[in-house]
Every structure is written in structure tokens, then in C-alpha cells.
């Protein structure tokens, strides 16, 4: 049974309780995430903001099972994931989570299409189905005509759109985006925001870590972090109705 | 001068910075140079003991023998033999001596022997040199030293002798065995030391050589001598082979093929001292051939090892190259610094290899008990030193040249940014791998990123498997020879067992085993280094695969698969390579390793490579995903 099938309707997609992450020991101990409680319901777009080094990326890694918390608990679709084996976590990521990184992390030797179909192939889809799904996704992100291009032949914005298409490959419960526009210029940022906007409109759960307040302002909810802890939470009522791009002031 | 000093200083500092890799480079090249030195040093090493024996025994220049005609005449015709003793160029002789075949019983066993009837007086040509006891007298037998040593018979023992009918392989009917005291053990240069055999006009396989007085020989076989042998001294010993060739040619031309000879008598069979010396060196020659072949294999393998190590080092040095170029170093200076490091290592490896080779040579040159004296310290000739040094430098330069030039031509900006070399894209392989299970998909794509590394890995395995198959075939040949000897003995004496000197045959086996182990160690080191290089190179793609849902086991298996796939191809190529190698190294070899052994090598290679690569692969697959992705940029 995969994570999608096990999702109870009332359960938030993501939940943490008193989650902590520490690095080092003794004098050199650093608490990157300090007793964070969080719930992300299905369909919500959550933005996490804060200065560099405040622990927002670490929190994202804990939510996605890329790192294990030092304390507390993390649930994904009602299933506690912080105690799962590496293998079980990998399966969970494969089925339920899509990652978008600031540095894109596309494989240089694979074309856009091959990069997008990779998660589906790893999830056991047939090559034909994986290819078909990847072509659809590239069409959705507006890169149907760039499918056979290598990452080195694409602009920064196009690369990030490929990375988003890849994150959608297995229809994940949640997309975790770490500074998705951090490496992009204004025009490319606009492209990516349009795409995220369409995902939000389609009901995709999104957790976006950013230090760009214009992008955060377009979310349903904004959490500010400092020194590993949540210091402020704002529910943005216009989130669902106001497109990212307008709120971010990047268009027009 | 300043430039040379700078190059030397930079090269020396970099070597000191990475002592382990420098040590491994040294080891890989030394394995090849030491083996090559050993092989080259074995050239002619048995000449000295044979020469000593020849001088001490008044050794003949030519051994002439004659057998009875095949039509069943009772005795051999001595006329041709006696004519030879007066031939032009012959200045002395001994014999003709009568020879019969016998069966020696001693220590509860029986062995076929060639019995030479000799005079008690000292012979002017071929007077065997006693190592123990005294020369023949009535009732006393002298055994050739190699034979006595193989059987464990010493002076003072008693042995039994029966006449042997060579046609039936049984004792002569009515012959009653006689008992003799072993009065002496002697060496001779007129015959190859046991267990090799010098065939006279008649050949009976691996027979021992013993001497009796003429009168005892007559009493042993009442039918009379089976053949006669005479030992000739020539005015010009060096012309012995020409003398033999000349007389054998004359004999052949006097008898038309397919027709009986006009003279109705068997012409004498001749053998020069040079032929006997070459036969004495047969086993050492096999060892030399194995070593020289092994040395070339090791040299090629060392190229692969060095290329792998250099490739890894170059990846580490990208930023250093950028710095050198940024402060004004020209591409040629950068290439020279990189090449200089490996040239220094190669020169050191040549020196160490030459030293080790010279030290190890005496272990392989112990002469048979049937020859006098030792080989002494093998001499290092200028040609050996030059060839070994050339090979060492060749290995270093061949493996370093491409990466050094590539590094030198790298853009300074890219080098300073320490950006990894872009991976290759092999479209068809990527498409094909989409149909494979996840570990194979990842492994195939990892392998496809660096085709040169895949070729090196396959080459390394192919060379090792070739060496192993050739060594197994050589061993199979040795075993067959031993069985062949045993069956000859069975036929002749009706007894079992082999008397091939186990010490000497074991030594050849040990040489083959040592070569195989050295090949294996180098190949294993290569496999581990290639795996590690692959794992490092693919760390971002591996981490990404894990972020996308691949398990550590799938990634680790993928890294292993990236090594196992080329290893399988290498092993497949190595089997015909090994067959070609054994045929090239020893054109007379007809025995190949059994099919099951070849299949075992193929399967074993895959299993061993999988096992060797499992640990580095597993370690690399367990690196924290976040750490890798944070440190690597697209």
C-alpha cells in the first residue's frame, strides 16, 4: 500500500511535533531546528521564510525524510516517518514527495525528458508509461519543444521548470521546494511562479522555503523562522485567490 | 634552471601530499618491472652450471648413437659409428659403448633405466664426475645424480636390475634379476639431467641413466646391446651443431623417403652439446617464458592501474591546475609538472624492480641435481636496465599523457571553480537502461558517464583473466606431461607413479601462481579504485537518485553493477585472450585449461568483482543526501 492510498481524509499531509535537529556536540552543538510543531493540510501552499541559516532548509529536509530529526516526530499522510528505515523512506519519497532544489540538480547527461521520466522509472512504471507521463508534464510546464535538450542547453528558468516537472512525475502528495527561484533572474522567476501558481490552483500541496518575501506573500500561510524555531505565523487570506505572480509584483 | 627547479619542487610537494597514491603507483609499476627483470635475468642462467659440468666431465661435443635396423637384425651396425670417430674435425672420442634397457628396483619401486656399459678406466671424453662414491666396478652400479636424487637412492644402497624388452614393455623373458650395490653417484654433460631425457638412436621416454661395467652389462641382457653410443670431441667445439647438421643431412640424402637405406644399416643419430644444454634449460626456459609473458601482462595492467590512479588524482588537482595557470603557468608547464611526478615514480619503480628482480632470480635458477655448481648472481646487463626503465617510463607516460594534456588545456576559470568534467552522454545506453531494474538502470548510466573508465576496467579484467587462463592452461600442460610420463612408465615397467622431479615442476607452478596472484592483486586494486572513482564521480547523481526515491541498496548495487558489467565483458574477452596468449607464449603448447575451469574463471570474476566493489559502493551509497547535494552544484 502506498502513501497516497493510506491518506485519511482528515489527516494533514504533513505534521510535526516538537521536531528538533542538532548538529555537533558539546561546545559546538548547533540546534538547526528547535521544537517545531507544524501541520500542513492537503492543498495548502505553505511558505517558510527566514534569514540564511535559520533552519528552514533543514526543516524541509526533515519533512521529506532526507534527514532524521534528533528529537520529536514527523508524520506524512498520517504515517510516522522519522523512525522508518532508509529503504522505507526511499519508497515514501518515490511515491509521496517531490523535491525542487535551488540548484535544480538535473543530471547533466540526460535530456529534459529523460530527467523527468527518471522518478517514474524508479517507481517501477513501464518505460512507455514513464515516457508518456514525462512528455505530458513537459507540455504542462511549457517545455514540450525542449524535451530532447540537455540541461546545458536550457536557461535557468527552463531547468527549474524541468525540475518541477520531475517533482510531479509520480503525482506526489506534497512538493517540497527549497528556494526554487533562488538561482533565477526576474524573468525566469516569473516563469517558475506561474507554474507554481497553476499547481496551487490544481490543489497540489506545496511547501516552499524562500527568503523572498514577494513569493511568500502569495502563499496560503506564511511561517517565519529564526534560530531554528517558528517566530511568527500568518494566514494570508488572499493566498488562494491571488495569483503568485501578481502578489509578487513581478508582472506588469 | 629556475623552471626545472620549479617543476621538481611542485612535483615533489604533490607526491608528498598524497603518499598513499604515490605508493600504489610505485607498487603497480614495480610489479611489472620486477617481473620483467626476473624474466630477462633468466636468459642463459643455466648455461653456467652446464658449462661447469661439461668442463668437469670432459663433456663431449657430439653424442653419436646407433640402433639395430628395424628389420630385426640382431645387433646395431657399428660401422657408421666407428666411421664418425674418424670423421674430419673429430680429434678425440670415447666408445662406442654398449647400451641396454633395464628395470631398476629399489626402495620398493621399479623404474625404467638406460644402462650404459663403461670401462673402469677413465674415458678421454665423457668421464662422469662423481659427486659421491666411486666409479663403476664389477658388481657396482653408478647412478646419474638427478635420477638418484629423484628416487632418493644414495651410495651404498642395493638395487635390483632386470633387462627390459622395449617392444613389449616387460622384463626380457627368462631374465633373472641381478642385485648391484650403488657404488657412486655422478653427473654427466652427455645427457640431460633427469627427469628430462636425451634420446639416443632409440627413445624410451623418461628413463633414468645408470652405468655398469661392460661385463656386468653383458650378463644383464644376454641378447646383446640394444644400441651403441660414442662421444666425440671436435677440434672446434662451437662447430658441433654444424657438424651434426652436416652429417644428418648427408644421411638423409643417402636414403630416399619411403625406401630402405641403400646401406641396409641404420645411420647414426647425432646430438650436439648445444642441444643438450638447451634441453637442460628447458624448465628454466619455461619459467623465463612465463615471466616475460607475465611481465608484459603486468605492464599493461600497470598502465590501467596508473591511468585509474592518475585519473583520480587529476580530478583532485583541477583546482591546483587552475591556480598554477592563474599565476602564470603555461599549459606546457602544467603538463610538465603532472608528467614529472609520474616519471619520478616510474624511475623509482624501475630501480626497485631491477633490485627485486635480481634478488629473486636465484630462487628460480637452482640447477638440477644433475648439474654441477650454481648459477651465481645474475648479471644486470645494460640492455636489461634500459628495457626495464623504458617499460616503467612507458607505463607512466602512456597513462599520464592524456589526463595531463587535458588538465593543461582546461579553462583556467573552470579549473578555479573546481567544476567536474562533464559526463559523456550515450543515448542508446540511456534508452536501453530505462527497461532495466532500478539498480541496473543506475549502474548502466553511471558506467555510461565515463566510457574511458569502463574501457580501463574491462581491460584490467581482460588482462587478468587472460593471465589466469594462460596459467591454468600451462598448469594443465604440466599435469598432462606428468601423466604422460607416468603412462610411459606404466607401459615400460608395469608400475605406476611419476618420477618427474616434483621440486622443479612445483617451481614452475609456483612461478605461475605468483604471477597469477600479482595479476589478481593489481586487478583487485584497480577494481576498488575504479569503483571509488565512479562512486565519487557519481555522488551527485546517486544522491539525487536517493532524493527521488532510490534506496541505498539500489544505489550501492548500481555502483557495483557499473563495475560488474564491464568486468563481465572483460572476462568474456579474457578467455580467448588467454588462449591466444598461451599459444603465442608457447607455440608448442596444445593443452588448454578444461572448459569447467574457464567457466569457473568467468563466474568467479563476476563474483569477485561484485564482492570487491560491494564495500566502496555501499559506503558511497550511505553518504547523507543533503550533504552531497549541498556541496555539489549543477
Image (cartoon, coloured by chain):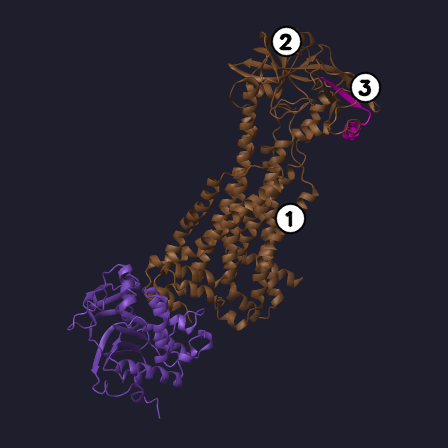
Chain colours: A purple, B brown
Q: Which residues are magenta?
A: B228-250
Would you say residue B22 is visible in this rendering?
no
* Residue neighbourhood size for the residue with mark 3, other residues' Cα within 10 Å, grouped as few (<14), some (14–19), many (≥20): few
Upstream in sequence: badge 3 or badge 1: 3
Return the residue found at the far front. Answer: B259
Assign a secondary structure to mark 2: helix
Q: Is residue B537 left or right of residue B132?
A: left
N-terminal label among 2 and 1: 2
Name the image quarter holding the C terminus of chain B: bottom left
Q: In x, y percent, where is residue B7?
A: 61, 61
Using the rendered view, name the quadrant where residue A12 is placed. Answer: bottom left
What numbered label is drawn on residue B220? 2
Mark 1: secondary structure: helix
Residue A166 seen = yes
Question: Disc 2: which chain?
Answer: B
Please identify, in this view, whether the residue under mark 3 or under mark 1 is nearer the observer: 3
Q: Up-down: is B353 above or below B210? A: below
Residue A77 occupies which quadrant of the picture?
bottom left
Q: Nearer the viewer, mark 2 or mark 1?
A: 2
Residue B389 tag number: 1
From the viewer's side, name the closer residue of B404 and A192: A192
Q: CA distance from mark 3 to mark 1?
A: 54 Å
Q: Residue B99: where, in percent of width, then height?
A: 68, 15
Amino acid at each position: 500500500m502506498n502513501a497516497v492510498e493510506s491518506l485519511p481524509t482528515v489527516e494533514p499531509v504533513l505534521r510535526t511535533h516538537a521536531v528538533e535537529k542538532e548538529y555537533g556536540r558539546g561546545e559546538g552543538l548547533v540546534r538547526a531546528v528547535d521544537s517545531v510543531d507544524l501541520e500542513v493540510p492537503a492543498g495548502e501552499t505553505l511558505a517558510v521564510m527566514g534569514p540564511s541559516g535559520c533552519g528552514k532548509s533543514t526543516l524541509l529536509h526533515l519533512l521529506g525524510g532526507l534527514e532524521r530529526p534528533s528529537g520529536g516526530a514527523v508524520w506524512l499522510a498520517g504515517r510516522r516517518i522519522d523512525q522508518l528505515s532508509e529503504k522505507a523512506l526511499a519508497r515514501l519519497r518515490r511515491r509521496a514527495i517531490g523535491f525542487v532544489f535551488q540548484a535544480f540538480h538535473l543530471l547533466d547527461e540526460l535530456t529534459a525528458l529523460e530527467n523527468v521520466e527518471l522518478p517514474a522509472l524508479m517507481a517501477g512504471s513501464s518505460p512507455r508509461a514513464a515516457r508518456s507521463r514525462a512528455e505530458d508534464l513537459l507540455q504542462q510546464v511549457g517545455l514540450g519543444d525542449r524535451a530532447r535538450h540537455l540541461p546545458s542547453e536550457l536557461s535557468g528558468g527552463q531547468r527549474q521548470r524541468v525540475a518541477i516537472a520531475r517533482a510531479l512525475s509520480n503525482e506526489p502528495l506534497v512538493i517540497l521546494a527549497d528556494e526554487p527561484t533562488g538561482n533565477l533572474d526576474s524573468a525566469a522567476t516569473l516563469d517558475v511562479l506561474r507554474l507554481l501558481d497553476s499547481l496551487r490552483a490544481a490543489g497540489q500541496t506545496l511547501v516552499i522555503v524562500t527568503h523572498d518575501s514577494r513569493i511568500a506573500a502569495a502563499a496560503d500561510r506564511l511561517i517565519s523562522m529564526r534560530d531554528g524555531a517558528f517566530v511568527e505565523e500568518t494566514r494570508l487570506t488572499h493566498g488562494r485567490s491571488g495569483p503568485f505572480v501578481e502578489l509578487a509584483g513581478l508582472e506588469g | 634552471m629556475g623552471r626545472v627547479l620549479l617543476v621538481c619542487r611542485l612535483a615533489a610537494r604533490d607526491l608528498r601530499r598524497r603518499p598513499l597514491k604515490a605508493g600504489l603507483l610505485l607498487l603497480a609499476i614495480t610489479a611489472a618491472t620486477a617481473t620483467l627483470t626476473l624474466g630477462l635475468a633468466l636468459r642463459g642462467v643455466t648455461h653456467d652450471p652446464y658449462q661447469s659440468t661439461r668442463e668437469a666431465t670432459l663433456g663431449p661435443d657430439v653424442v653419436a648413437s646407433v640402433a639395430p635396423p628395424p628389420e630385426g637384425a640382431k645387433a646395431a651396425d657399428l660401422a657408421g659409428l666407428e666411421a664418425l670417430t674418424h670423421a674430419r674435425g673429430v680429434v678425440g672420442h670415447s666408445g662406442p659403448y654398449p647400451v641396454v634397457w633395464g628395470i631398476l628396483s629399489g626402495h620398493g619401486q621399479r623404474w625404467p633405466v638406460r644402462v650404459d656399459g663403461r670401462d673402469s678406466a677413465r674415458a678421454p671424453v665423457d668421464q662422469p664426475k662423481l659427486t659421491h662414491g666411486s666409479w663403476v666396478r664389477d658388481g657396482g652400479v653408478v647412478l646419474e645424480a638427478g635420477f638418484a636424487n629423484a628416487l632418493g637412492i644414495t651410495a651404498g644402497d642395493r638395487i635390483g636390475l632386470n633387462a627390459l624388452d622395449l617392444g613389449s614393455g616387460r622384463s626380457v623373458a627368462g631374465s633373472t634379476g641381478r642385485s648391484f650395490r650403488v657404488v657412486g653417484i655422478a653427473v654427466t654433460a652427455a645427457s640431460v639431467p633427469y627427469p628430462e631425457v636425451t634420446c639416443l638412436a632409440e627413445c624410451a621416454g623418461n628413463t633414468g641413466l645408470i652405468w655398469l661395467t661392460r661385463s656386468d652389462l653383458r650378463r644383464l641382457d644376454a641378447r646383446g646391446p640394444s644400441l651403441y653410443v660414442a662421444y666425440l670431441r671436435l677440434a672446434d667445439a662451437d662447430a658441433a651443431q654444424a657438424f651434426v647438421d652436416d652429417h644428418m643431412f648427408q644421411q638423409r640424402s643417402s636414403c630416399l623417403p619411403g625406401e630402405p637405406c641403400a646401406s641396409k644399416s641404420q645411420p647414426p643419430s647425432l646430438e650436439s652439446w648445444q642441444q643438450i644444454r638447451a634441453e637442460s634449460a628447458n624448465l628454466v626456459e619455461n619459467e623465463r617464458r612465463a615471466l616475460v609473458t607475465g611481465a608484459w601482462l603486468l605492464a599493461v595492467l600497470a598502465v590501467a592501474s596508473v591511468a585509474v590512479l592518475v585519473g583520480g588524482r587529476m580530478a583532485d588537482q583541477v583546482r591546483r591546475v587552475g591556480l598554477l595557470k592563474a599565476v602564470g603557468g603555461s599549459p606546457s608547464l602544467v603538463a610538465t609538472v603532472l608528467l614529472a611526478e609520474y616519471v619520478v615514480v616510474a624511475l623509482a619503480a624501475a630501480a626497485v624492480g631491477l633490485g627485486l628482480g635480481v634478488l629473486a632470480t636465484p630462487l628460480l635458477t637452482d640447477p638440477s641435481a644433475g648439474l654441477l655448481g650454481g648459477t651465481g648472481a645474475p648479471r644486470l646487463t645494460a640492455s636489461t636496465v634500459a628495457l626495464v626503465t623504458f617499460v616503467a617510463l612507458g607505463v607512466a607516460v602512456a597513462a599520464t599523457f592524456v589526463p595531463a594534456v587535458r588538465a593543461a588545456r582546461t579553462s583556467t576559470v573552470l579549473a578555479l571553480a573546481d567544476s567536474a568534467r562533464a559526463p559523456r552522454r550515450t543515448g542508446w545506453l540511456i534508452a536501453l537502461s530505462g527497461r532495466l531494474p532500478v539498480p541496473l538502470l543506475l549502474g548502466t548510466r553511471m558506467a555510461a558517464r565515463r566510457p574511458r573508465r569502463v574501457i580501463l576496467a574491462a581491460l584490467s579484467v581482460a588482462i587478468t583473466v587472460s593471465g589466469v587462463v594462460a596459467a591454468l592452461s600451462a598448469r594443465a600442460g604440466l599435469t598432462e606431461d606428468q601423466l604422460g610420463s607416468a603412462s610411459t612408465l606404466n607401459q615400460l615397467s608395469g608400475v605406476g607413479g611419476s618420477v618427474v622431479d616434483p621440486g622443479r615442476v612445483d617451481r614452475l607452478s609456483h612461478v605461475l601462481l605468483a604471477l597469477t596472484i600479482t595479476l589478481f592483486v593489481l586487478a583487485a586494486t584497480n577494481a576498488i579504485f575504479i569503483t571509488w572513482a565512479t562512486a565519487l564521480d557519481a555522488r551527485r547523481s546517486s544522491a539525487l537518485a536517493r532524493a527521488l526515491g532510490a534506496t541505498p541498496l539500489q544505489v550501492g548495487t548500481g555502483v557495483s553493477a557499473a563495475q560488474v558489467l564491464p568486468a563481465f565483458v572483460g572476462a568474456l574477452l579474457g578467455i580467448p585472450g588467454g588462449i591466444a596468449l598461451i599459444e603465442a607464449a608457447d607455440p608448442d603448447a596444445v593443452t588448454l585449461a578444461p572448459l569447467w575451469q574457464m567457466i569457473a574463471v568467468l563466474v568467479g570474476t563476476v563474483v569477485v568483482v561484485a564482492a570487491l566493489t560491494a564495500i566502496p559502493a555501499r559506503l558511497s551509497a550511505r553518504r547523507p543526501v543533503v550533504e552531497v547535494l549541498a556541496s555539489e552544484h549543477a
